[in-house]
Image: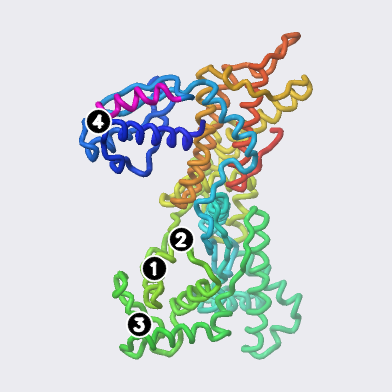
Amino acid sequence: MTPDVLADLVRVAALDVLADRGLDVAALPSDVGVERPRNPEHGDYATNVALRTAKKAGVAPRDLAGWLVEDLARRPGIAAAEVAGPGFINLRLAADAQGALVGEVLAAGKAYGTGDELAGRNVNLEFVSANPTGPLHLGGTRWAAVGDALGRVLIARGAKVTREYYFNDAGAQIDRFVASLVAAAKGEPPPENGYGGAYIGEIAAQVLAAEPGALDLPDAERDEVFRRVGVNLMFDEIKRALHAFGTDFDVWFHEQSLHDSGAVEAAVDRLKESGSLYEADGAWWLRSTDHGDDKDRVVIKSDGNPAYIAGDIAYLLDKRARGFDLCIYMLGADHHGYIARLKAAAAAFGDDPAVVEVLIGQLVNLVKNGQPVRMSKRAGTVVTMDDLVDAVGVDAARYSLIRSSVDSTLDIDLDLIARRSNDNPVFYVQYAHARLASLARNAADLGVEVGDAYGLLEHPREGDLIRTLGEFPAVVATAAELREPHRVARYLESLASAYHKFYDSCRVLPMGDEEVTDLHRARLALSVAARQVLANGLGLLGVSAPERM
């Protein structure tokens, strides 16, 4: 019996009790829920439905809880029900009803944990979107892991998701990048506010290899060659690193295309016509304070050139024209101001600001031997995605970046996540899967097959593992709703813990000449179910589920 099924059973019982006693059934909340109590001695599950319903129904909470307990105790699958505290209800499930969840997991297989509550949502998920002026640093690496995992979680709950990378290939930062390449090609130091690091020299050399006469061209033509070839080489490097990291995109969108196509000009004209822009001090300003921003924003500067926000506005219009009803932007720690301005831009076009959702990620720090890691030989001043992967591997890097809320600054201990021990979270979870895979191989060698005598699974560790398996769909649903894939990682650690404790307390396979019993088969079925859920969860994180370790 899954938590959702149990919640439905509690709701039906509550409706029956209210109706039988002539009480208002409308007093019952629509979202009757159950949860696992912190202390397992209080039961398998608990519900506060009586506390939430009693006042509207005009009765005392403990009285309503008592009537519900009498009804629930007679329901199939409920072994015991009792009133606790001011009106909580603790429930214990019958072993066969609880164990039936194992069969549900096995039947669902890879689909266990999926749902359809987001069916019909067309989501544009934009993440990473680092300027193409250097290798991906740790902030972009964090978004590469978290954004990809979020996309997987949203898809698992029914959404259609387009992963999109927005290349900021227009503006002053590209000019500085090109000037840095030219300087490196000439053997000169980078210009003021330019870019350093070995990668600049490497790309400059590749530009000259592709266009040997580039330095002999007039300055404007030379710069155009270094822009065209150099930026594309940087794009290719970013794409390579992302693919190696297990993060691929459906759309690579170029900011420059918005300027070249006239989309920026068209968006600005539309805002002028609607009165959402006004002229002051020679510039054109968006009335963003009308929509909750802390100040109006310059869209066209006094020199007649578009400000950065002009491209953002045109880009939002483009997304909406492509049919996306939810546009999620995953931005770095220094982009808090974008939340209000993007929503204001949507409102200025007469759109619902809720179509824009901005997630802000905090910084990542690396620590090794108790000291911060600050330098990259190739990038010069930052630690890159490749640095992290070279140090610990893709799985450890992805998992460690995903498992914490992006709302908080993340400190990653390189010594810890490279360690093959149970205090390393990714090893702990992957080892549980590998241990289960080994168990399956041993079972096959012994000729033991899964069985469905789930009523025999009465050991407390069996019950704890079953209930943990039952939580997975709700965890994924909550991770999708709150845009928090770290919840899946933390759940997997709880599941791995529950499995290791089960394995240490309950022998799954017979020893020696011991006869194979239905209990062995039922425990094997529970083990196979645990392996399936671990694999499903790791898959949502883009982390491998190894067969051997």
How dense is the environment of label 1, judged by Cα within 10 Å: few (below 14), some, or many (20 and up)? some
Residue that appears at 44% across and 85% down:
268
Residue 353, label in figure: 1
Indicate left or right for 446 with 248 as reference.
Answer: right
Badge 2 vs badge 1, beta-carbon distance below 8 Å:
no
Q: Please, is residue 66 above or below residue 418 in the view? A: above
Q: Mark 2 and mark 1: span between their CA atoms?
A: 20 Å
Q: Tell me the amino acid under the disc marked 4.
A: Pro
Determine which of the numbered discs, if any, sits on residue 276 in the image.
3
Q: Who comes first in sequence, dot 3 or dot 4?
A: 4
Task: Specify the quadrant of the image occupied by residue 25.
Answer: top left
* Viewer-nearest residue: 1 or 475: 1
**Quadrant placement of the C terminus:** top right
- Dot 2 amino acid type: Gly
| Image location of residue 248, percent across then percent down | 64, 59
Question: Which numbered circle lies on residue 332?
Answer: 2
The reply to whether residue 408 is visible in this rendering is: yes
* Residue type (three-letter) at the residue carrying disc 3: Ser
Q: Which mark is residue 520?
A: none
